[in-house]
Amino acid sequence: MSMAVVGMIAGMALGFAGYFGGFGAFLLVAALGAIGFVVGRFLEGDLEPGDFFRTRDDKRGRRR
């Protein structure tokens, strides 16, 4: 499935949530979608838990 189709489906889900459930439902669907995206990246091996807890100096390769 292409990224354009995934983006379209996500946009439609957010649109339906916003229309039928209001702004709170829109935010809930957006937050759960973001969490699902991050979990999916972990499962694919693209992210590691340490990526969120490193300091800026470690990401740039400079260490003191």
Image (cartoon, helix red, strand yellow):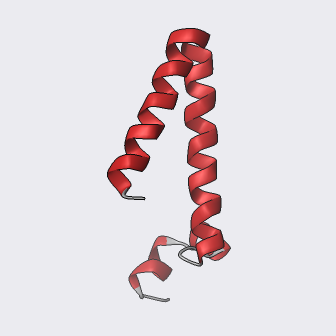
Location of residue 29 in the rendering, given as x and y in whole percent from the top left corner: 60, 31
Farthest residue, direction left: 4
Query: Taking 17 as reference, is 20 above or below it?
Result: above
- Quadrant where the N terminus is found in the figure: bottom left
Location of residue 45 in the rendering, given as x and y in whole percent from the top left corner: 59, 78
Q: 1 or 13, which lies in front?
A: 1
Q: 1 or 38, which lies in front?
A: 1
Q: Residue at x 54, y 14 (%)?
A: 23
**Is there any visible trace of residue 53 in the rendered image?**
no
Q: Residue at x 36, y 58 (%)?
A: 2
Q: 17 or 47, which lies in front?
A: 17
Location of residue 36 in the rendering, given as x and y in whole percent from the top left corner: 63, 51
Location of residue 3 in the rendering, given as x and y in whole percent from the top left corner: 37, 55
> Which quadrant would residue 61 be assigned to in this image?
bottom left
Query: Taking 30 as reference, is 19 above or below it?
Result: above
**Is there any visible trace of residue 20 in the rendered image?**
yes
Q: Residue at x 59, y 74 (%)?
A: 44
Q: Residue at x 56, y 54 (%)?
A: 37
> Which quadrant would residue 27 be assigned to in this image?
top right
Query: Taking 56 as reference, is 33 above or below it?
Result: above
Task: Give the tally of numbered discs.
Answer: 0
Q: 51 or 41, which lies in front?
A: 41
> Which quadrant would residue 20 be assigned to in this image?
top right
Is 61 displayed left or right of 52 in the figure?
left
